Amino acid sequence: MRDTTQSGIGERSLHCRAFHRVSPMTDLAPELERLRPQLLKFALLQLRNPTWAEDAVSETLLAALEKPQAFAGRSQLKSWLIGILKHKLVDQIRRQTKELSTTSADDEDGSLEDQLFTQDGHWRDAPHDWGNPEQSLNQVEFFRVLEACVDKLPGQQGRLFMMREWLELDTDEICKQLAITPTNLWVMLHRARLKLRECLEIQWFNGRSA
Amino acid sequence: MKGGWGMRSCREASALMVRAEGERLAWGDRLALAVHLRLCSGCRQFEGQMRLMTQATQRWRQYSERDLDA
C-alpha cells in the first residue's frame, strides 16, 4: 500500500497533493468492484433483503474509499472489507429492528418438527452415518453446498443463524436486535440446525458415507 | 427410547444440544440429556453432526475472509 502521509506538504504543489490523496482511491476502485459480488453474497445471506444488502455493501465500499489509508499494511483486502461489512450489517439490522420483528411471523414453520419427529418426539428417520465428515472440510465444493443450504433457510431463521454463526453475535444481542425472546431464539436456532443438517445430509453426505 | 426419570424425547434432546452451544444447561437438563444420549444412537449421531456443522461454519467464516480469486 502506498504511503499517504502528508509530510513535506509545504514544498508540494496543490496538484501534487491532490494526486497523492486520490491515487490510492483510484487503485482501490477496480479491486472493490471485483470483490463487490462476494460482499453482496454475504450481505444477502445475512439480511435476506436485496435493498438492505445493496445498502450495506455500498456503505462498506464508500467507507473503504474514504479511508484507504486504514487498509495500509494489511495483506488481505477482502478480510478488511468483510470486517467493515460486518459492522455495516449490524447497523442495518439495528435500523430495521422494527420491520424484522414484524416479518418474523412469515416464516414460522411449526410443521418442521412434525415432519422430522413422531408425535411422541422420536426421529421419524434417524440421522444417517456421515462416514468421515472431517474430510469434507478440506473440500471447496463442500462449502458451496453449505452456502446453498444456509441460503435455503427461511428468512428469519437464516438471519438468526447468520447472526450467530457468521457475525458471531451473542444471543442477548441477537434477541435485542430482532426483538425476540430467548425461547423464541432457541426454537428458531433449533429449526435452523435441523434444516441445515437435513440439507447437508441430502445434498452432500448421502452416498459419501460408504 | 421412552419413559424413565426425566427422560427426554429426541425432539427435546436435539433442542437441548443446540441450546447447550450457547448457554450452560440446568443440571436436570444436562443429566437427562446425558442419559438420553447413552441410550439413543440417533441422537448420538446428531450430536456428532452438530459438532461437524459447528466446525464447518467456523471454517466457512475463515474462508469468507479469504480472497480466493486474488
Image: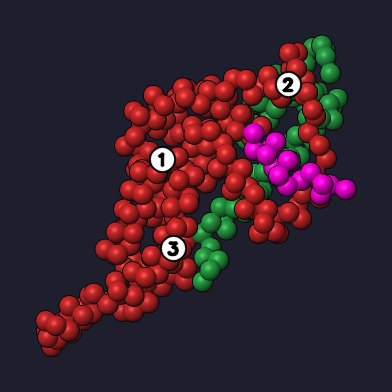
Chain colours: A red, B green
Could you say which quadrant of the image residue A138 lies in?
A: bottom right
Residue type, label 3: Leu
Q: Secondary structure at mark 3?
A: helix
Residue A49: which numbered mark, if any? 1
Residue at mark 2: A117
Specify whether residue A168 is in view.
Answer: no
In the depicted structure, whether residue B56 falls above or below residue B20: below
Q: Is residue B5 above or below residue A1?
A: above
Estimate the x, y position of residue A109 in percent, counting from the top left.
57, 23
Q: Which residue position holds label 3?
A: A35
Mark 2: amino acid:
Phe
Mark 3 or mark 2: which comes first in sequence?
A: 3
Disc 2 element: loop
Q: Residue furthest bottom?
A: A11
- From this view, report whether residue A163 is shown above or below residue A72: above
Q: Do the residues indicated by labels 3 and 1 lie within the same chain of the protein?
A: yes
Q: Indicate which label's residue lies in the foreground, 1 or 2.
A: 1
Give the residue at x 14% y 83%: A15
